[in-house]
Each structure stands twice: as C-alpha cells, then as structure tokens.
Amino acid sequence: MKDFSDHNSDLLLDISILYRSTQKYYDQMLQSVSLTYAQLPILILIYENEGISQQRVATEGSYDKGTITKQVQKLEEMGYIRVQPSQKDKRAKELYTTSKARQIMSKVYAIRTSWWQHISASIPQEDMDSFSTFYKNMAVSAREFAQADLSEILFFEQQNISLESYPGKVSTVLSTGGCNFRCPFCNCSHLVFLKENTKSIQESQILQYLTRRKGLLNAVLIKGGEPLMHPELLPFLKKVKALNYDVKLETNGSYSALLKELIDQNLVDEVLFHIKNTKEKYGETIGLKDYDIKEVQSSIDCLQKTKKSITFVFTPIQELHTMEDLLAMARWIQPAQKLELHTYQEKETVIQEGFHGYSPEALKQAQEKIQEIIPNVVIR
Ligand code: SF4
C-alpha cells in the first residue's frame, strides 16, 4: 500500500492537516477558559495592541466584516474584551482586554508554546526559523492575493512564436489550465491536473508581450486544457482584439454558450473543434462514462451556422476508433467546412499509457473514405 506519510509535496493537503490538527489541539486545551481556536488570534492581537481598532484586527487577520463582528461580540459577551468608540473617529471601535482576559493570558501563551514545541520537536532550530519566515511571507502573499482582482484569466504555458499553429500567421500560443474532460489518451495531464506550484502567467504579462510584439506577431492561439471553462476569457479576448490580433480557439466544444458569445462578439476568427468519438462512445472516450453530449451537440449546431473559419479535428486512436466510428463522426458533423485528421503520438505527459495512433497508411485510407462525406479533409 502507498505510504501516505511520504507523499510528494502537496501544500494544500499539508496546510489542511496542520490546520485541523492545530484546531483540535487548541479547542481541547482552551475548553477550560471557554475560548475557541478561532477566537485566540483575535484575543492575542488585542492583548498585544490595547486600543487596536476592529478594522485593524480585520485587516491583520484577513477576517471578513461579518466574522470579525461576530467574534468581537462573542469575546465581549464572555467578558474578555471591552469595546469603546474611538475618541478620534466616532465610527471606529477600539478594543481592549479586560482583567478577566489578562488573568488567563499566561495560560494561553503556555498552550501556544507547548503546541509549537510539539510540532517542531523533530526539526532543527534553523529549519524552524526558516519555516517561520517562509510561512509569514506566504501568509502575507496569500492576504494580498485574496484582496487582488481575481477576474483575470491565468495561463500556464506560452509558446512565444509559432509559424505552424495558425497557418499563414505568426502567432503566440497560450494554454489555459484545467479541463472538464478526462480523455485517457490526453497528452496534457500537466494542464488538466495542475500542480499547485505550476507557474502561472498573468493576463497583464501576456497583454504587455502582445503590445510590444505588435507588427512581429499577428495572431494568438488559445488552447488548453479547455479554454472555454474560463468565463474570464471573453474580457481577455476583447483586450487582445483591441490590439488587432487574429484569434484562433482550440476547444472540446463543451461550453456552447460561451463559444457562441465569442463568435457573436467577433472575438474569435477561427475555431478548432476536437470531436472525440461517435455520440454513443463519447462518454467512454472522454473518461466520463455518463457524459451528456448536449453541449457538444449545441456547439456543433452553432459552428455549422457561422461564417467563421471552422475546422473539426478527429484524432484516430486504434483502441478507440474503428473506421466505421470515424465515418459516423463525419456524418454527425456534416456539413463541415474542413476536417483535420491528427496523428496521435503518446507523450510522457499522457494521462493513461497504452494508446496507439493510426499508421500513416490507415490515416490515408480514413481520409479517402471520409472525403466521400466531407470533401475537405487534411492529415496533420
Ligand atoms: S484531450 Fe483535451 S479535452 Fe481531453 S482531457 Fe485533454 S485537454 Fe481535455
């Protein structure tokens, strides 16, 4: 059995364990003074900064207004603090500890020290000092990030310049993170299952890059993961269009409303739509057995009506697609302007190993047969 004490670095899980264990310890130890783990940092902040404003406590501890108001009220009711209006600003509240609180503070500090000693017992002092500094810095960054504008889209890969991705254009290629499908043959597991320390590229960095490269570049290809999972894509593309770039979007077609919106607002010029299999085999092929294809169907319907340049893509895989499946897929999407047959080659970053693409001969044969349904078929 896997040894979970030796798991790879997973900050989210580690923080969760640390948080819950710490909470359990404090809640137990503080029972005798009727305090909780959640109230303790607030009481210490007030004790060490008598007269501190409620607003300042909220900012220091990153508490929202409702939480801080409730906790301050509770501490006051318990007789641990008193609240008085500020002399300087009548709307502000100053917080002071009472003599009841001061009587228990040495016990509170002892409880806190004891926990610290317990969790740091097997760690050398200098490592603990570094940890404290890292942790403090991370808390500051987390607090800043929580207050930042989170409405911007993040990218996780950028190919600065590509001549092949958008034929006839010099493009930059951007990959979003996350996908709602789980195609076992997917070669982008690193983008589907993002590690928490995966480096992201901010929208503002991309816009700066595009502004500086105007004239050298003339197009942007957005791919994933699945880009349409991110509603922030729309305002981002407005900014890209304002810089006069052509936009090509690569999608699995499972967010038809946003796709339609982008087309209606002229925010994409070309769409590359990956069709995974026949209607009957769709769920199995994308790793979600009970998947309802209505979104995919809506996207096909939408793309069949548009005047934009639309390319459907099939990636034939020996284990998943028979020749009959490919023909059924072609019949499903027609009338289609253009179809690309992509050659599949498993990569190290595949979700599940063991899939094989069609040979060049089999692809050629598929092309010839599909051309009887969709005339414009190319192999890539
Ligand atoms: S192949 Fe595409 S649609 Fe499938 S999981 Fe990977 S990124 Fe998502």
Image (cartoon, rainbow, N blue to C red):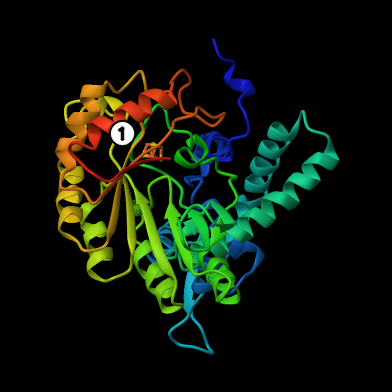
Q: Position of residue 118 (x, y in %)?
A: 70, 32
Query: Position of 338 compared to 124: left or right?
Result: left
Figure quadrant of the N terminus = top right
Figure quadrant of the C terminus = top left
Question: Toward the viewer: 221 or 96?
Answer: 221
Question: Given the current orientation, which residue lies at the most extreme bottom position?
Answer: 88
The kind of residue on which mark 1 rests is: Gln
Q: Quadrant for ligand 1?
A: top left
Residue 3 placement: quadrant: top right
Q: Is residue 29 above or below residue 68?
A: above
Query: Position of 46 compared to 240: left or right?
Result: right
Q: Secondary structure at mark 1?
A: helix
Query: Position of 260 compared to 202: left or right?
Result: left
Question: Given the current orientation, which residue lies at the most extreme top position?
Answer: 1
Could one spot residue 279 in this view of the protein? yes
Residue at 17 percent across and 26 percent down: it is 280
Q: Position of residue 326 (x, y in %)?
A: 25, 29
